[in-house]
Image: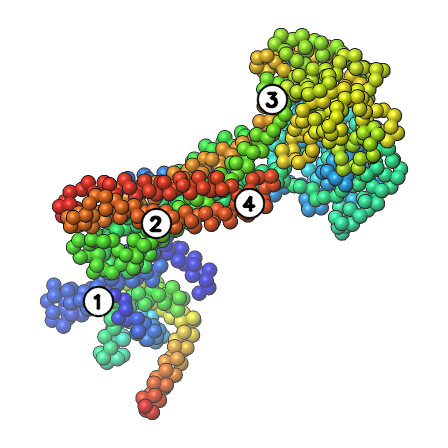
């Protein structure tokens, strides 16, 4: 019979068990009847005949068992038996069951949650077509990180390359626009500005309605929009007549809707969580072919088939040099860098943190298993009698082991189910946090199932192993609880304690290391005061406000600033081109000093008077900008302290002159003030120097304006007033964002904050498990040795001696476990150093602290039961059996 | 408890196949025929017969069918399959070879 055939047969038999049993019984009954008839024919009386037949046949019960085995459902019957028995035992030992369930629920739940995050954010395939062929093109400089490619360069790369199938550009991940419609409240939605090629290139251009963007649209500079399916349903109620309708944004721009995307593309992991639906805008108007100063979009390209990334890089290097030659003013020193396009929306650090949390939660589960193994061992010792009897009655060791394992697996499945519920609850929280749904999909459920089974097997194997080894006789003897516990079992439990200590040590060290690192990052020296600071951003339109230094933008600022400053509760108000986080790096020069290389850069900002006051930045020398610093008056500058000290050590920088991006040396600005250094960008692990140069906003006004206010009370209270003020001056626009500085920073740090909180919770959980486990085991060992204690005390030992006995044992274990743990923790942190930059190295403070903590717990765990043991009346102890 | 017949398991299978080669029989019939053929010298451990029958059925060497006997009782009749016939041949061969080897050892030792 083929393997499949026999498998089918077995399954069929299994299902028709009842009938098979009946038939078997009937068959054997027939046989016995015939034998009895034969006997009767030989003259044996009827009753006797039946007995004789039975005797001749053999032990009917055993034969039926064997038959069942051959028929292939013995194991199933036995399994059901084991399950029933396990349920019975668990019900009787409620204490153990509850503890086990809770421990497992926590241990498994933590792992399920971590896996849900891992699965959703890291392991899911990216919805782009053939993502391995996608590359990113940035402007590269000899020093410093790559920067965005300006539109002029982008268009040249697109037109002149031979290595890419398509080159596209996009902007606006996490950028929102406000849509204004007459008669409806303004809606905010995620938006993405894209070139016509972008969606087809990424392979995400299936449409449900209408058409996509075409190069012809781009050539005409039409303002067109595409809606995502979710957005179309949510905002337009799936109205099929939406095509051709206008979409107005608060920037004063009007787009025509030309199409709706397919629902299959409503993937929240695309572009970092645009879960409410996204509107795509054609990035045509701002693509100035002559603009090469700086860029703000991300350029992505698809390699032609057969072209390697190195070949593409080589061609672009040549192209970059050509651009340098053709446009020396803007492109000197600018290379073109080709790198693989990162298809995971999360940055490296966050990814690594997620893996770390996954690893640590595995350790927590291991701790839980160790605890449970210990608990099981204790119970098995107590069940010595029952198991001994089973063995005596013919139960094979294998069967016994199977029975114990079944029990463990059942508990851990139940615990796993509870853990799943826990994960569901915490998953909801995480989903809201990451703006991505974290469903309990089959993969996650399968993971939980597997983990539960594995956990059950792991902690069940321990008592099973010992059960298999105990002889029948020893456990049936009276006083089987043992004057001294079984040696090997005792040693094993001691080993478990050591393992538990070591693991707890590793867990806590790992978590502590990261928590310290995160704290170091988040408490970085800012140099300015974020409390009660409100930051907003306005984007005025090009048509009305022109380019940089256009007098219209200056006029706008002149109208806006006094009104903002006049709002009730405002302590200081200011305008600038960028907020304190987004300063652009520039090259600069000092009058009278040799040329500085391209690698020396300063952060450049253009604040109005009142800016430093609003941010709480201290003016160390000279003066702040004044209203009199305008176009037409001499150019002035304010510099940071480090800059002043580096280039004019020992003397005052006031009155000296510097220039920015000014090879012709025409536009020196005179230094009129020095302020303290501040942290200039959101790259939390940047090591840039703290050089900063400030020019007055009035002399550099632009239509993208950042507003800063410092309020006397809470900054939130000012928000309404600010919106109204802006609206009164320019009713067609709204603020693109408006939030307190603290909120903005919290947003940047939220991944770290979440990680830190998770790590602390996990470390706490692990410590709790370890402490409970260690205490439980030692307390139990002490209880088992009650008899021994009684004997010792009867023989004259003092209470102190007994306590010392236990304590000595415990301390020895603690030292061994902690030593092992230190080794492990050392290795772990060494490995971790490579993972995350800018984190502190091995921190002796953390490891020392954790070691002390664990030793303390162990000592306490030894001391308390030891004392309790000595309180027992020796006579009682000797009698107890 | 099953250890006793383990050694004879292979031989029992062969004997049963041999008996069934002559025609279909139910379990009781097989027992009787074996006693008959061996002139009452072989008393099969009846307890091991039925597990053996089920095992051989699982392996596909025999197939079973419920029928009415001459006495108007229901019984399960077993018959040899093609695979069973092949198995019987190979077992006969193996057995002959083994007895030959044993005989040779006994003669020479």
Q: What percent of the width, then of the height, locates residue A121?
A: 57, 39
Which mark sits nearer the N-terminus, 1 or 2?
1
Say whether residue A838 is left or right of residue A7: right
Label 1 vs label 2: CA separation? 63 Å
Residue drawn 25% across the image and 44% down it: A803
Is A385 placed above or below A659 here? below
Q: Which mark is residue A57?
A: 1
Say which chain tag 3 marks.
A
Say which chain tag 1 marks.
A
> Are the residues flagged by discs 1 and 2 in contact, CB closer than 8 Å?
no
Between disc 1 and disc 2, the foreground one is: 2
Is A48 placed above or below A95 here? below
Residue drawn 49% across the image and 42% down it: A844
Q: Which mark is residue A530?
A: 3
Q: Are marks 2 and 4 on the same chain?
A: yes
Which mark sits nearer the N-terminus, 4 or 3?
3
Q: What percent of the width, then of the height, locates residue B81?
A: 40, 69
Which mark sits nearer the N-terminus, 2 or 4?
2
Say whether residue A162 is left or right of residue B50: right
Work out whether residue A97 or residue B45 is closer to the camera in this orientation and state it: A97
Q: Are marks 1 and 2 on the same chain?
A: yes
One can see residue A379 in this view: no
- Residue indicated by mark 4: A832
Residue drawn 16% across the image and 55% down it: A478
Please, what secondary structure does the residue beneath circle 3 have? loop
Between disc 1 and disc 4, the foreground one is: 4
> Are the residues flagged by discs 4 and 3 in contact, CB closer than 8 Å?
no
Residue drawn 22% across the image and 78% down it: B40
- Residue indicated by mark 2: A812
């Amino acid at each position: 019979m083929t393997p499949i055939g026999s498998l089918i047969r077995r399954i069929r038999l299994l299902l028709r068990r009842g009938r098979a049993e009946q038939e078997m019984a009937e068959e054997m009954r027939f046989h016995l009847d015939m034998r009895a008839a034969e006997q009767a024919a030989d003259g044996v009386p009827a009753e006797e005949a039946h007995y004789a037949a039975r005797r001749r046949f053999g032990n009917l019960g055993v034969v039926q068992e064997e038959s069942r085995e051959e028929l292939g459902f013995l194991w199933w019957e036995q399994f059901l038996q084991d399950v029933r028995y396990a349920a019975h035992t668990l019900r009787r030992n409620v204490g153990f069951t509850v503890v086990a369930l809770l421990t497992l629920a926590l241990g498994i739940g933590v792992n399920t949650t971590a896996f849900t995050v891992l699965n959703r954010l890291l392991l899911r395939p990216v919805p782009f077509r053939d993502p391995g062929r996608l590359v990113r093109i940035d402007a590269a400089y000899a020093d410093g990180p790559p920067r965005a490619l300006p539109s002029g360069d982008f268009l040249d790369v697109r037109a002149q390359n031979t290595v890419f199938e398509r080159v596209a550009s996009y902007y606006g991940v996490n950028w929102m626009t406000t849509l204004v419609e007459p008669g409806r409240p303004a809606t905010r939605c995620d938006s993405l500005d894209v070139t016509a090629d972008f969606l087809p290139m990424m392979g995400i251009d299936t449409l449900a309605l209408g058409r996509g963007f075409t190069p012809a649209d781009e050539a005409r500079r039409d303002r067109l929009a595409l809606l995502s399916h979710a957005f179309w349903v949510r905002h337009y109620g799936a109205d099929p007549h939406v095509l051709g309708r206008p979409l107005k944004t608060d920037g004063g721009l009007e787009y025509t809707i030309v199409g709706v995307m397919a629902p299959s593309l409503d993937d929240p992991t695309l572009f970092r969580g645009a879960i409410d639906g996204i509107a795509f805008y054609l990035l045509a108007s701002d693509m100035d072919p002559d603009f090469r100063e700086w860029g703000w979009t991300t350029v992505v390209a698809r390699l032609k088939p057969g072209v390697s990334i190195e070949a593409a890089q080589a061609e672009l290097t040549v192209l970059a040099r050509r651009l340098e030659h053709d446009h020396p003013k803007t492109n000197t020193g600018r290379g073109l860098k080709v790198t693989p396009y990162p298809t995971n929306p999360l940055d490296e650090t966050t990814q690594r943190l997620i893996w770390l949390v996954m690893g640590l939660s595995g350790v927590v589960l291991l701790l839980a298993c160790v605890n449970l193994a210990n608990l099981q061992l204790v119970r098995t010792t107590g069940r010595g009698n029952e198991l001994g009897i089973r063995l005596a009655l013919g139960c094979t060791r294998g069967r016994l082991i199977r029975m114990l394992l079944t029990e463990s697996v059942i508990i851990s499945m139940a615990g796993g189910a509870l853990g799943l519920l826990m994960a569901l609850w915490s998953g909801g929280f995480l989903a809201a946090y990451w703006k991505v749904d974290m469903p309990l999909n089959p993969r996650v459920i399968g993971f939980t199932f597997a983990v539960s089974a594995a956990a059950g097997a792991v902690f069940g194997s321990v008592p099973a192993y010992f059960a298999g080894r105990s002889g029948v006789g020893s456990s049936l003897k009276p006083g089987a609880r043992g004057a001294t516990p079984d040696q090997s079992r005792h040693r094993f439990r001691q080993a478990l304690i050591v393992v538990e200590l070591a693991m707890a040590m590793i867990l806590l060290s790992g978590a502590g290391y990261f928590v310290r690192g995160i704290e170091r990052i988040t408490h970085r020296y800012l140099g300015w005061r974020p409390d009660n600071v409100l930051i907003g951003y306005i984007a005025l339109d090009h048509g009305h406000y022109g380019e940089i230094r256009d007098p219209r933008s200056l006029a706008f600022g002149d109208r806006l600033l006094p009104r903002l400053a006049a709002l009730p509760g405002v302590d200081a108000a200011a305008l600038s081109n960028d907020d304190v986080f987004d300063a652009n790096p520039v090259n600069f020069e000092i009058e009278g000093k040799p040329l500085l290389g391209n690698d020396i850069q300063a952060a450049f900002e253009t604040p109005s008077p009142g800016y430093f006051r609003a941010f709480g930045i201290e003016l160390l020398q000279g003066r702040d900008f004044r209203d009199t610093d305008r176009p037409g008056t001499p150019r002035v500058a304010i510099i940071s302290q480090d800059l002043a000290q580096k280039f004019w050590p020992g003397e005052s920088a006031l009155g000296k002159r510097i220039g920015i991006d000014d090879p012709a040396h025409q536009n020196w600005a005179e230094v009129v003030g020095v302020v303290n250094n501040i942290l200039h960008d959101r790259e939390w692990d940047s090591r840039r120097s703290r050089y900063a140069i400030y020019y007055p906003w009035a002399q550099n006004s632009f239509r993208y304006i950042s507003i800063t206010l410092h309020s006397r009370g809470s900054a939130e209270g000012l928000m309404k007033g600010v919106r109204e003020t802006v609206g009164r001056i320019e009713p067609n626009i709204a603020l693109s964002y408006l939030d307190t500085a603290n909120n903005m920073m919290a947003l940047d740090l939220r991944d770290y904050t979440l990680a830190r909180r998770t790590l602390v919770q996990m470390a706490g959980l692990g410590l709790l498990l370890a402490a409970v486990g260690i205490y439980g085991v030692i307390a139990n060992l002490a209880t088992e040795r009650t008899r021994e204690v009684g004997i010792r005390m009867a023989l004259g030992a003092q209470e102190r001696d007994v306590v010392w006995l236990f304590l000595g044992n415990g301390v020895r274990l603690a030292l061994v476990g902690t030593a092992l743990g230190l080794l492990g923790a050392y290795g772990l942190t060494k490995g971790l150093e490579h993972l995350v930059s800018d984190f502190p190295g091995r921190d002796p403070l953390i490891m020392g602290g954790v070691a002390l903590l664990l030793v303390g717990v162990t000592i306490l765990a030894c001391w308390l039961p030891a004392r309790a043991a000595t309180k027992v009346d020796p006579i009682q102890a000797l009698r107890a059996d | 408890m099953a250890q006793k017949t383990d050694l004879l398991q292979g031989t029992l299978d062969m004997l049963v196949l041999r008996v069934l080669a002559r025609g279909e029989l139910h379990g009781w019939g097989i027992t009787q025929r074996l006693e008959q053929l061996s002139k009452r010298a072989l008393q099969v451990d009846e307890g091991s017969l039925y597990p053996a029958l089920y095992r051989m059925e699982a392996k596909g060497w025999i197939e079973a069918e419920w029928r009415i006997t001459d006495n108007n009782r229901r019984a399960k009749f077993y018959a040899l399959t093609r695979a069973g016939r092949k198995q019987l041949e190979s077992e006969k061969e193996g057995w002959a070879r083994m007895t030959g080897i044993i005989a040779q050892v006994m003669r020479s030792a």
